[in-house]
Image (spheres, grey):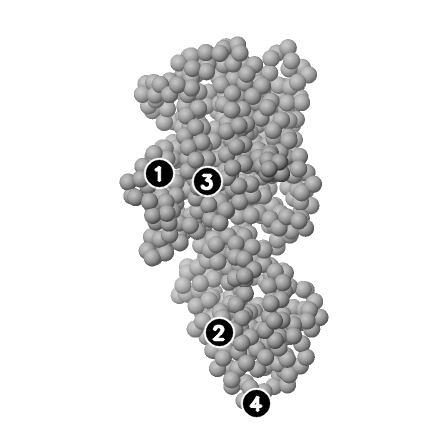
Amino acid sequence: MSATKSSLAALTLGAIGIVYGDIGTSVLYALKVVFSSGLIAFTPENVYGILSMVFWTVTVIVSLKYVTLILRADYNGEGGLIAMLTLASQAVKDRPPLRRVLLLVGIFGTAIFYGDGVITPAISVLSAIEGLELVAPGLHPYIIPTALLILFALFFVQKHGTSRIGRFFGPITLLWFIVLAVLGVTQIARHPTILYAVSPHYALDFILGSPGIAFLLLGALVLTVTGAEALYADMGHFGKKPIRLAWFSVVMPALLLNYFGQGALLLEDPSAVSNPFYLMVPPQLREWTLLPLVVLATAATVIASQALLTAAFSVTKQAIQLGYLPRMVIHHTSVREAGQIYIPAVNWLLFAAIVLAMGLFRNSTALASAYGIVVTTDMLITTVLTFFVIRYAWGLPLALCVAATGLFFAIDLLLVASNMLKIVDGGWFPVLIGIVIFTVMLTWKRGRRLLADKQHADAIDLRSFLDAVFISPPVRVEGTAVFLTSEAGAVPNALLHNLKHNKVLHENNLFVTVRNHETPWIGLDKRIEITPLGHDCWQVIVNYGFKNDPDLPAALEPVRNRGCLMDAMNTSYFLSRDVVVPTLGGGMAAWREKLFAQMHHNASAAADFLNLPNNAVVELGSKVEI
């Protein structure tokens, strides 16, 4: 019993550090953006109305939607947009047109996530470093260079992994939330009546009194719930109970106390809108507490950025295995944790985009204009997919499904509509990133389909071919040959080239097809399918889920029990390296075919992706027109 409690406590602490880093740093800029918009006057009624909207936004979107409803929609314990997309698409697999639409919607949500991966680190770290201006106003010119230097250090250390420092994430973030609560309480104690804003009638009065302004402010209010998607995405790492316990016992109380504390401060001193978070520190304490607070805030934002970076690597790996992105070099940074990976291309492309974002927007308030639209779009997509999961996968009555998701859909739609107004002011930036990546993903998926169709049209039946070959068999040499082929039952090009040029066949031959499935995990009991073809030849199908780590040599171990004398020292892996040649009048526009050909050329080698030994790989190339 004590071990279980200890494990729950450790998981809850870990969830505080990883899951809630993003939403925990929104206090640095959310209310500043709302009140510095110039849309509302600093009257007590308006302050109460805004705080009431903040309270109910956090309660409805995070507590009710994500913590209560969305966390129930797990796929074998896994969460996240791709897991939800898989659940929804499988639930409607008997409705192909609807399934195609849901796949497009879900993949678009995955693509624009990368826009969030750019804006979140930029706005979080920049808003923390801006506290230096209060320490010494002369430091203003150094704000952006300091933020970029910190982010560069964060991105640089990714290749070494975070297992050593990861253990400190939870305690540091817990300290951050304690400080948030203390700062809030010190201001609330001066104006305890601010707590009346919990009543929803203040929010309703504000909305009904100024509906147009309330709609405009929704785009800024959504900043208070950025990071809510992490609740669902990290469910597989921590489980539902620790995430819920962390939210209701620590995170939600600390956030709301801080927001209400900022509101109390603004009631007393409207000029504090320039930076209400840092100015909550009592004047007599600022001289010796402000700098440590900036350091703690910076640490919290770095941890939040790290969590988002880790998510970007994970999502990229899943998209690769689902066939929506080309293979990339993936480094495992921990011998204990399989999920700790580093993808250099993603790492440095994100950093380059962050540098560009900081150069374009210059401060956290301007960056807030670019923020929100990505978050709200993902929230809306999650709600839509949830409806199809609870309706078709869980089989709940239509009326109950509409009731369960209808309110959230209406709120998400309002938030998206409000944020659309920020397109011109900067919202175009993350949207552009999302559209570019969405185009790349669809082009790669479509190109792979065209390539597979071409190979299928030219394919030779493997069984018939082997029967013909063994009428007058070639010379057999010692060892085992593993021929990789994208289509089971077809003759690999590498085999044809080997027979043509080397005129030999190995003693044992495995024809291996690797299949990636729309499911997170596939266990070892279902990993491999073996079919004897005679003549010491076997057809092998290896199955992976989109969260499994491919390791082909390890997966092929069971063939020893089928009579194949597979020895690592005498095994060669033959791969076909196809060169794609775009043609006019093909299945895609010319520019998309050229893009696909370039991506196919630059994709990392299958040998690296499948963890094949470098000294045992033979690649034989051929040209394929699409």
Q: Quadrant of residue 306?
A: top right
Q: Secondary structure at mark 1?
A: helix
Q: Earlier in the sequence, mark 3 or mark 1?
A: 3
Disc ID at residue 489: 2
Residue 430 rendering spot, x and y as whole percentages: 48, 40
Q: CA distance from mark 4 to mark 1?
A: 67 Å
Disc ID at residue 209: none
Disc ID at residue 71: 3
Q: Nearer the viewer, residue 36 or 25?
A: 25
Q: CA distance from mark 3 to mark 1?
A: 14 Å
Q: CA distance from mark 2 to mark 4?
A: 21 Å
Q: CA distance from mark 2 to mark 1?
A: 45 Å
Q: Is residue 347 visible?
A: yes
Residue 522 rendering spot, x and y as whole percentages: 52, 57
Q: Residue at x 51, y 24 (%)?
A: 253
Q: Secondary structure at mark 3?
A: helix
User: Which amino acid is tagged 3?
Assistant: Leu
Q: CA distance from mark 4 to mark 3?
A: 62 Å
User: Which amino acid is tagged 4?
Assistant: Ser
Q: Secondary structure at mark 2?
A: loop
Residue at the disc numbered 4 = 472
